[in-house]
Image (spheres, rainbow, N blue to C red):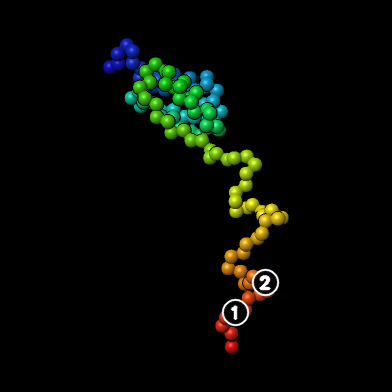
Amino acid sequence: MFGQNQQSDKELQKTVSKRLERTGTGSQSKVQAVVRRGAVTLTGKLQYERQRSPILKAVQSVAGVRQVIDQLQTPPKVRPHSQPTEHRKPRVDEPVVLEDSPINDIGSIAQDPIPVE
């Protein structure tokens, strides 16, 4: 069924799993590999984007792997020390603009144009 240089998917699965364990990043991030006809599909969540490249290289270097399908996910990038704009407080010297405010330019309460009866 297989030539001398080909492995069954089951054997290839074991080899790929061992290789992922040796990279260290695969076990920390819970990476799963599924082998089907020599194609390895990687799924799971990485802690950091920088883990992706060593994992892909490790799997690609396994003899018998024909293709690597990368379905690994990483958390969204969050910039440290930045706040979303909707939560930002205005600086003390920054004017506060109130749109559609009942307060007119001189600071008094605007009168309703239609009197209430």
Residue at 42% from the left image edge and 21% from the top image edge: 60
Q: Nearer the viewer, mark 2 or mark 1?
A: 2
Question: In front: 116, or 93?
Answer: 93
- Find numbered disc 2 in the image and state the secondary structure of the residue it sits on: loop
Which disc, if any, is residue 106? 2
Question: In front: 98, or 55?
Answer: 98
- The residue pinned by badge 1 equals 112
Of all residues shown, which one is farthest toward the bottom? 117
Report which quarter residue 5 is drawn in. Answer: top left
- The reply to whether residue 100 is in sight is yes
Residue 50: x and y, percent? 53, 28
Which disc, if any, is residue 69? none
Amino acid type, mark 2: Ile
Q: Quick one: quadrant of the N terminus?
A: top left
Of mark 2 and mark 1, the one earlier in the sequence is: 2
Residue 69: x and y, percent? 39, 29
User: Gap in Å between the C-alphas at discs 2 and 1?
Assistant: 16 Å
- The reply to whether residue 14 is in sight is no
